[in-house]
Amino acid sequence: MSVERSREMGKEVGAPLLTKSEENNGVGMVSSSDSSTFCQELKRVSSMAAPMVAVTVSQYLLQVVSLMMVGHLGILVSFSGVAIATSFAEVTGFSVLLGMAGALETLCGQTYGAEEFGKLGNYTCCAIVTLILVCLPISLAWTFTDKILLLFSQDPQISHVAREYCMYLIPALFGYAVLQSLIRYFQTQSMIFPMVLSSIASLCLHVPICWGLVFKLGLGHVGAALAIGISYWLNVIGLGIYIKYSPACQKTKIVFSSTALLSITEFFQYAIPSGLMFCFEWWSFELLTLLAGLLPNPQLETSVLSVCLNTTTLHYFIPYAVGASASTRVSNELGAGNPKKAQGVVRVVVSIVIAEAIIVSTFFVCCRHILGYAYSNDMEVVDYVADMVPLLCVSVSADSLIGVLSGIARGGGFQQIGAYVNLGAYYLVGIPIALLLGFHLKLRAKGLWMGTLSGSVLQLIILAIVTALTDWQKEATKARERVVEKSVKTHNALV
C-alpha cells in the first residue's frame, strides 16, 4: 500500500488513528530525540484512551440506568432483587465474557501489526462463536439463580425477583458476547470512532426504551432486563453495519467460515488465562462485600464498603482505557517486529497513569469530608468514608498501575502469568489478611479493605517485575513466528 493511499484511508471516518505506513517508518523519521519520541507516543495513546473511557462508561451505565428505573418503581423487593441480580450476573456471566474477550487483544493486535489482515476477521469470528457457546452453560446457571442465592441465606422474595431478572437478561448475555468481540476487533485496529458512536447512541436509546418497558408497558423489573438486551443488540447491529459498509474494514472483514473455527484451540489458549486473570481480581472485591455483611453493624460496614467500591469502580474506567490503548500499541508493535517501540509504549503509559493517580488521589484527599455525601446523608457513613480516604488513595494508585500493566500483559500475551499472579495475590494473600484484620483484629471494613489492598499491591509488584524483566526482542520474535506458523497451518488445512 502506498503512503498516499494510506493517508487517504486515514482521512475516512472511523479509519485507524495510526496508518500502517506511519507506524512502520518509525518514530525516528519525525525526530531522533527521546523526548520527541515520548511525546509522539503520548499523543497516540491519549487519542485512543480518552474515547475508550466513553465507550466503557457508556456500556457500564446501561445496567445502572436499568437499576435506577426499577428503583423509581417504589417497590423495595424489586429494587433489592435487581441489585443482587446485577451483581450475580456480573460475577457469573459478564465478567467471564469480558475477560475471555481479552484474548483478541493478543491475537488480533499482533496479527494486525504483522499486516495479516485477513486473519483478524477470522479470529473475531472465532471469538464470537466461542463466547456464544460459553453463554449456554452460564444461561443454564442463571435459571437456578434463586436456588443459588438461597444457599447464601438471601430472602426468598428477593431471590425470586433476582431469578426473573436474570432469566430475562439472558438475551443481553448473548449480545454482550458478540459486542465484546467486536469491540476488540475495532480496538486492535485503533478504530475508536465507531465504538464511541455506537456506545453513546445505544445509551441514549436505552433510556427511553427502558422507561417505556418499565413504566409505559408495566413490565417492571422484567422490562429493565429486556431493555439491556435490546441496547446491547442495537450496539452490535450498529457496529455490524459499519463493518459491512465501511471501506476501512474491507481488508479485515469478518466472514463466518470453517477457516475461522480452526482457531478455536488457539483462542482458548489465551482466552482461559485472560478470563481467569480478570475474574480472580473482580471476584475478590465481590467477596469483600459478602464478608462485610458478617461484621458487627453490617448495614454501616456494607454501606461504607459499597461507597468505596463504587468510587474505585468508576475510577477504574480511566486506567482500563489506558490499558486497552497500551494493549493495542504493544501488540501491534510486537506483531510488526518493533520491540523498541513496544518498550517505549510501556514507559509512556506508566507515566500517564502515575500522573493520573497523583491527580485523583489529591482530589480525594481534598474532598475527603464531602465524598461520602455523594452516596449518603448519614453523618456516620460520611465520617467513616473520610477515614477510609487514605486507603482509597492507595487503592486508586494501585488500580491505575494494575490496569495498565494488565493491558500490557494482554498485548504481549502474558495472560497465563497474570492469572497465576492474581490467584496468589488475592486468594493466598489478600483475602486471608482481610479476614485477619477485619475479624480477628476487629478493624472491621477498614481491615477488610486493607487486606484486599495488600493483594492489589502484591499483584502490582509482581506484574511490574514481570514487565521490567520482559525481553521485548524475544516477544517480538515469538509474535512474528506465531503469526507465520498459523498462516502455514491454515494454508495446509485448506489445501
Image (cartoon, grey):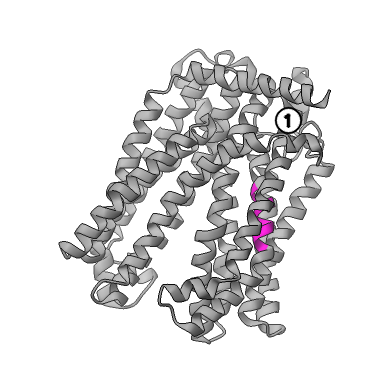
Magenta residues, dominant SS class = helix
Helix, strand or loop under label 1 = helix
Left or right placement of residue 272 versus residue 229 in this view: left
* Residue at the disc numbered 1: 119
Q: Position of residue 193 (x, y in %)?
A: 68, 44
Q: Position of residue 325 (x, y in %)?
A: 54, 37
Specify the segment rendered in magenta: 172-180
Residue 356 visible in the displayed image: no
Residue 385 visible in the displayed image: yes
- Name the quadrant of the N terminus: top right
Residue 42 lies in the magenta stretch: no
Left or right placement of residue 44 versus residue 343 in this view: right
Q: Position of residue 170 (x, y in %)?
A: 66, 65
The residue positioned 51% from the left and 78% from the top of the image is: 159
Amino acid found under the numbered disc labelled 1 = Lys
Rendered image quadrant of residue 110:
top right
The residue positioned 50% from the left and 85% from the top of the image is: 157
Q: Position of residue 471 (x, y in %)?
A: 44, 19
Closer to the camera in the image, 133 or 348: 133
Closer to the camera in the image, 395 or 80: 80
